[in-house]
Amino acid sequence: MTFRRSAVLVLSLAGLAPAAHAVDDIRPGLWEFRSTRLSLGGLPDMSAHMSQLQQQLKNLPADTRRMIEQQMAQRGVSLGQDGTVRSCITPEQARQDTIYSGKVEGNCTLSDVMKGGDTVIGKLRCTDPDATGNFQARVASPERFTTRVTMQSARGDLDVETEGRWLAAQCGG
């Protein structure tokens, strides 16, 4: 998998991190997500280099970049300069159960979703690039949760762990 395609896939999957809010007891408001593990195609952990992936987004063709940014903005996701992703979770979203089999997140479809206690697990099937994998979200407190996504494709494997933390009750502009 080329670095550019990897960057697109990782940034697209960043939109999945906020989905963990479907587990009970998540506070609404502004959340920040930081990749704590990012492994692409057997390469060493690249989580410290997420800002470089964001730079790759800037280097994509204008139409591709605009499409990704629009998809992220439609989900209330923005990119921080330090490699973080910020997203607003509304009170309505915090109360909704939005993780279910058949749900489409970007170019990925969720299946075999199971919930128990503070954890949600399931499978993903994605297109462009074609990939399959698993996800898990675990809520540590109303202000913290973690997600893990592992994907396999002909272009290489992906393993992403993300920590979400609540920043503020108000999301701002």
Image (tube, rainbow, N blue to C red):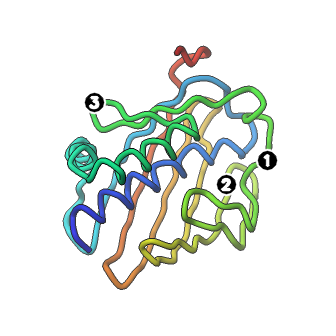
Amino acid type assigned to the residue bearing label 3 in the image: Gln
User: Mark 3: which secondary structure?
Assistant: loop
Q: Are marks 1 and 3 in contact (CB under 8 Å)?
A: no
> Going from the N terminus, do you reach mark 3 or mark 2 first?
3
Left or right of 55? Residue 19 is right
Judging by the rendered image, the residue that carries numbered circle 3 is 81
Judging by the rendered image, the residue that carries numbered circle 1 is 97
Which residue is rendered at x = 31% and y = 78% of the image? 156
Residue 84 in the image, given as x and y percentages of width and height: 36, 36
Which residue is rendered at x = 76% and y = 58% of the image? 116
Residue 71 in the image, given as x and y percentages of width and height: 51, 46
Residue 58 vs 25, above or below: the answer is below
Residue 131 in the image, given as x and y percentages of width and height: 47, 77
Q: Between residue 41 and residue 3, name the one nearer to us.
A: 3
Disc 1 residue crowd, few under 14, some 14–19, many 20+, Cα 10 Å: some
The Cα–Cα distance between marks 3 and 2, rounded to whole angstroms, is: 30 Å
Amino acid type assigned to the residue bearing label 2 in the image: Thr
Which residue is rendered at x = 40% and y = 80% of the image? 153
> Going from the N terminus, do you reach mark 1 or mark 3 first?
3
Mark 1 or mark 3: which is in front? 3
Judging by the rendered image, the residue that carries numbered circle 2 is 119
Disc 2 residue crowd, few under 14, some 14–19, many 20+, Cα 10 Å: some
Residue 165 vs 146, above or below: the answer is above
